[in-house]
């Protein structure tokens, strides 16, 4: 599949994600959009975006997130639909693709330093952000599961890099 396909969401940009990456982003979106009542179905909040970034290994600054969100949040409600979210994530994912940065992100997420990311690590990250609730555990495990390609229940650095940089590592 060498042919680059045109995505309707892409405007005046060089953004390009593989369809697989897009599918993964869709899964993350679905996980968050089914959460909190206040964010409603089919949309996610600015808070969710922050967690989604962390879960994907990015550490954007508060200000950067605000800028990314204000770029797509036309009605100013702070709720983003899938296309808004996709635009933000694509922007971020296509701009930050340095492997060293990703390795640093992996280390950041691997809270217990066992060389793997499991849902406990993600729970710690969420807890540090004051975001963790008991009902999130399952969602976080779901995120682990879809990055976990060999099915051992945890995400190795290789799986992590592969997940974020499919085009380079496959
Ligand atoms: Ca770990
Ligand atoms: Ca694994």
Image: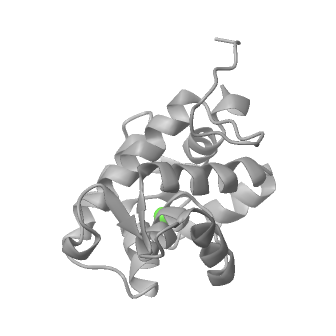
Query: Which residue is painted at 24% across and 66% down in the image?
Result: 40
Which quarter of the rendered picture does the C terminus lie within?
A: top right
Q: Is residue 7 left or right of residue 28?
A: right
Which quarter of the rendered picture does the N terminus lie within?
A: top right
Residue 30 position, x and y percent, is 32, 51
Rendering quarter of residue 118: bottom left
Q: Which residue is situated farthest in the front direction here?
A: 75
Q: Is residue 112 left or right of residue 107?
A: left
Residue 66 position, x and y percent, is 61, 77
119 or 33, nearer to the observer: 33
Q: Is residue 139 placed above or below 108 in the rendered structure?
A: above
Determine if residue 153 is in view: no
Query: Which residue is painted at 46% across and 74% down in the image?
Result: 46
Q: Is residue 57 left or right of residue 117?
A: right
Total numbered labels placed on residues in the image = 0
Q: Is residue 133 left or right of residue 121?
A: left
Rendering quarter of residue 11: top right
85 or 147, nearer to the observer: 85
């Amino acid at each position: 599949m060498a042919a680059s396909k045109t995505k309707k969401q892409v405007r005046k940009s060089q953004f390009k994600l593989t369809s697989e990456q897009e599918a993964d982003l869709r899964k993350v979106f679905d996980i968050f959009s089914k959460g909190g009542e206040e964010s409603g179905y089919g949309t996610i909040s600015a808070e969710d975006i922050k967690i989604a970034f962390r879960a994907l290994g990015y550490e954007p600054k508060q200000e950067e997130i605000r800028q990314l969100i204000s770029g797509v949040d036309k009605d100013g409600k702070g709720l983003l639909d899938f296309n808004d979210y996709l635009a933000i994530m694509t922007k971020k994912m296509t701009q930050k693709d340095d492997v060293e940065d990703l390795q640093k992100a992996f280390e950041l997420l691997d809270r217990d330093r066992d060389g793997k990311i499991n849902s406990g690590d993600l729970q710690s990250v969420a807890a540090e952000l004051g975001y963790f609730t008991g009902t999130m555990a399952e969602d976080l495990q779901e995120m682990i599961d879809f990055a976990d390609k060999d099915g051992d229940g945890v995400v190795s650095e290789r799986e992590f890099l592969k997940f974020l940089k499919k085009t380079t590592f496959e």
